[in-house]
Amino acid sequence: MDSAAKDKMKPALPCGFSCSGPEWPEQERAEQLARGAALKWASGIFYRPEQLTRLGQYRSREVQRTCSLEARIKSVVQSYLEGVQTGVWQLARALEAVQGTREALSQAHELLKSMAQASQSLKPLREQVSQHKQLQALSQLLPRLQAVPAAMAHTQTLIDAQRLLEAYVSLRELEQLQEETWAPLGGLELPVFQGLGLLAEALSQAVETAAMAARKLAREDPALLVAAIRVAEVEAGRTTPVGQAPRDWRQRCLRALQRGLEQVHFSTTTLPEPGALARWLEALQVALPAELATAEALVAPCCPPHYKVVQLWAHTLHNGLRRSLQQLLAGPELGAADAFALLHWALHVYLGQEMMGSLELGPEADVSQLEPLLTLENIEQLEATFVAKVQILAENIRVTSLVSESLQQRMHGMALSELGVFLRSFSDALIRFSRDHLRGEAMAPHYVPYLLAAFNHQTALSSSVSSLQPDGVASGILAPIEAALDELQRRICRLVLEALQLELQPLFESVPSRRWLSSSELLDCVCDQTSRFCRDFWRVRSPAVKLLLAEAERTVVLQYLRALMQGRLVCRDADERTQAAERLRHDAAQLKELFLRLGLEENSHCAPVLLALRELLNLRDPTLLGLEVAGLRQQFPDVSEDHVSALLDLRGDVSREQRQAALISLQDGSPPSPLTGHRALFSLVPAPTPSFSSCLPSGPCS
């Protein structure tokens, strides 16, 4: 294309591009600066007269320079104008292209609308095509579908005949046919396959039945056992179709192996009768190693290696035996012979070389790392039963009576003497044990449970010592032994209460206080700690447990009274006195609820003393304090002037005269009436600064 044609295609420039416009302010300023610079230059050049001769040369040179600059400026402006013309032309062409594209898109949109309407009209046709495809698929599968009922009946026959592998192959063919019908039918379930799930369940039950009888089948029909295991393994390796729940036949098979083994040896009908425990244990001593040998020789070859048959057998036998022993111990109490036989068998025979520790058994049969057959509680229970029911000394004394009366008396004296020596040595050992624990020299991880076990042993010994009383001899002969047993009980009880007191002492350091007035959080902590401490008391035999609970409750109350007497708080006004009285009422109710829940009868509680102190704080008129103090002494004869004075300090509003009057009423009041079963409280709480050990009870456990 030549330049002339190109110029014709370009649009004409507007007038503003060719006509000179108004001068810019910057242009005028630039011209002024240029003129000033030129004048300065000219004045410098032509300052001397001899320079004027060269004026023509300077003029011609500047004219040439000016013309050159104007030419360059015109060239730049012309180039810029040509670029603008080209851009305007391209924009015009682009506008024409956009308009054409818009028209094409509009036509395409109309075409899509017409196609959507046509597609909607074809919907019935598509449905007919889908139905036709389903009918075509059914027509192709119809011969196979007609044979489904007969195939299902044949599969059931194979299951009944215990031909498990053939039954599984037939079942899988039916399931594959069912899966083939799902895709063309869109997941529709045909009625002909409704019984297929029941058929699969029947086969799984047949596999479980064979696994439960593994011990018998391994000897008589190992092929059936192998077939059952193979069916379970093939099913475990099968990929389950999407939407179907996996059939975990392998785990069901393993559980069936365990159930069959447990039913043979540890069903409820096989538990021994009273007196027959030793024979039952002797039978197990022979049967369990033989069972493991059978598993290793006959059952293991029928199963895959990952079944670990010998280990499975050993663990199943161990756990089943453990559950049976727990059921046995939860029933009627065993006799002395049975208790001894079970202890000896479980602790020495079971894991010994005669049974599970035999060198003939491989490492898979090791059960030493599993839970022991008897827990520590079981062992303590059996030991207590044996101690309570075996009275070897009494039997020896009766035997000596067959020789002579003098021998019987000497035997009786020796028995009592040795029993006394034992009780003294046991008491001394208990003191050393407690001292070493409290000093940290030999910390016992289960300090309180050990003390409670000693409590039970003392109770069992006390209940059986009467059997040492010879016929025709005065009962006083056993008095020293009975006194030593009572002293041992008090000592054990005192050690238990000392442990409780050590745990509670830090909690009572903030009682009473402003925090104590406004919240029950402090006593909540006391109750939680006491509840955790007393949770093992249920192991203590009755009636000793009632004594222990009563002394524990009195220890908590004594700690509370001791804290009140420390003078840590003085009420500032009547509102705080009312608040303190209400806190005492609430705390008394909370302690009562705690120990009722632990099993302590209400008539054994000491917490009501807090309600009596509440009345002393809640009194509005201080002039009536004498009456309240007198009533307090009637209820608690061991209250002293120091205790009353500390309580009056807690009120914070008692003058010297009112205090003196209240203390005089305490001295001059009528003597307190004797209370049957009165338990000392205030006499064990020195005021105002009691020592730690003086707060221990001096009642039944002192």
Image (cartoon, helix red, strand yellow):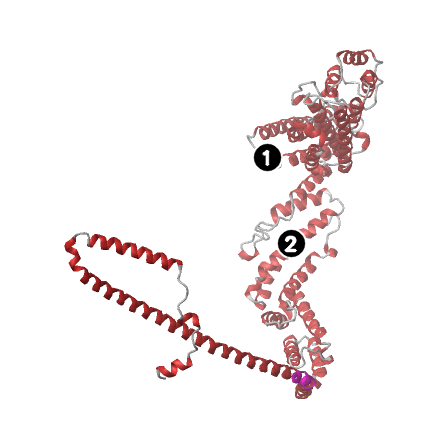
Disc number at residue 319? 2
Image spot of residue 334 (x, y percent): 73, 44
Image spot of residue 85 (x, y percent): 41, 74
Q: In what quadrant of the picture does the N terminus appear?
A: bottom left
Classified by dominant secondary structure, the portion drawn in magenta counts as: helix
Residue 418 falls in image quadrant? top right
Q: Is residue 409 left or right of residue 375?
A: right
Q: Secondary structure at mark 1?
A: loop
Residue, far left: 50
Disc number at residue 444? 1
Whether residue 401 is visible here, answered yes or no, is no
The kind of residue on which mark 2 rests is Asn
Q: CA distance from mark 2 to mark 1?
A: 30 Å
Residue 595 falls in image quadrant? top right
Q: Is residue 35 left or right of residue 301?
A: left
Name which residue lies at 81% across and 13% down.
665
